[in-house]
Amino acid sequence: MASGFAKTLLVVGILVVVVGVIERQRSARKLAVPPEGALQVVAGKAVAAREITRMTKKSRIPLGKHVELDLDPGAGPVTLTLDSGVQASVLTGMGGLTLEAAYDPTDANALYRLRVGVKELVSYASVAERKKEAARRQLDDGGQVRLIGGVMILLGAVGWWLGARSRAA
């Protein structure tokens, strides 16, 4: 009986470590900050801005908020996504003004810089720093998960070994 529990603990520990490693790689790619020169720049009139709250499907628990900004450069509106660190109040009174935005089209049009003339509303440095900090937090959390998986592997291996040893005696 104990041997079955030890084997289960060992297998679950291995799965936890593998999932932790995969999630670490996924989050590193997701939170990578592109160089400022690789961003696409668009200038146009601010059409609309809205705050979006992501919710779970069943229990309707809020997962997070972000702001979307619609800019119309003349060829149709482009929806840009501001990260959660940018307050919606930054966009207050911007309707109809010509804004210049730098965004990453490969990352759901994530906004990295927003200007009105020479006044910078959202700076590349602040967004990049927030993303780097989020990546550090996720790496710390992932490290804790992998540590728990490692402890599970160790306990499962010791339990399995002790069970085999007691059966042999």
Image (spheres, helix red, strand yellow):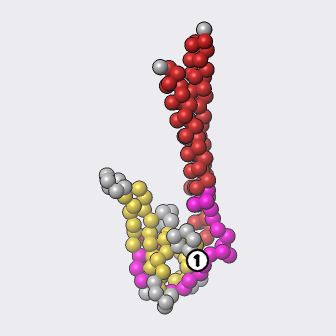
> Image height check: is 42 above or below 159?
below
Nearer to me, 63 or 86: 63
User: Does 58 sit left or right of 128 as displayed?
Assistant: left
Circle 1 Cα neighbour tier, 10 Å, few/some/many (<14 / 14–19 / ≥20)? many
Q: In which quarter of the image is residue 42?
A: bottom right
Q: Name the residue under label 1.
A: 102
Residue 47 among those drawn in magenta: yes
Q: Is mark 1 on a helix, strand or loop?
A: strand
Quadrant containing the C terminus in the rendered view: top right
The residue shown at (58%, 66%) is 127
Q: Does the magenta portion include 41?
A: yes
The residue depicted at 61 percent of the width and 70 percent of the height is 124
- Measuring 50% from the left and 88% from the top, which residue is drawn there? 73
Query: In this picture, is 3 found above or below 110?
Result: above
The answer to whether residue 12 of the structure is visible from this angle is yes
Residue 102 percent coordinates (x, y)? 58, 77
The quarter of the displayed image where residue 117 is located: bottom right
User: Could you tell me which residue is drawn at 49 percent across and 75 percent down?
Assistant: 80
Q: Where is residue 161 in the image (x, y as percent from the top left)?
A: 61, 20
* Residue 7: percent from left, percent from top: 54, 28
Say which amino acid is labelled 1. Answer: Ala
Toward the front, the furthest residue is: 168
Magenta extent: 28-49
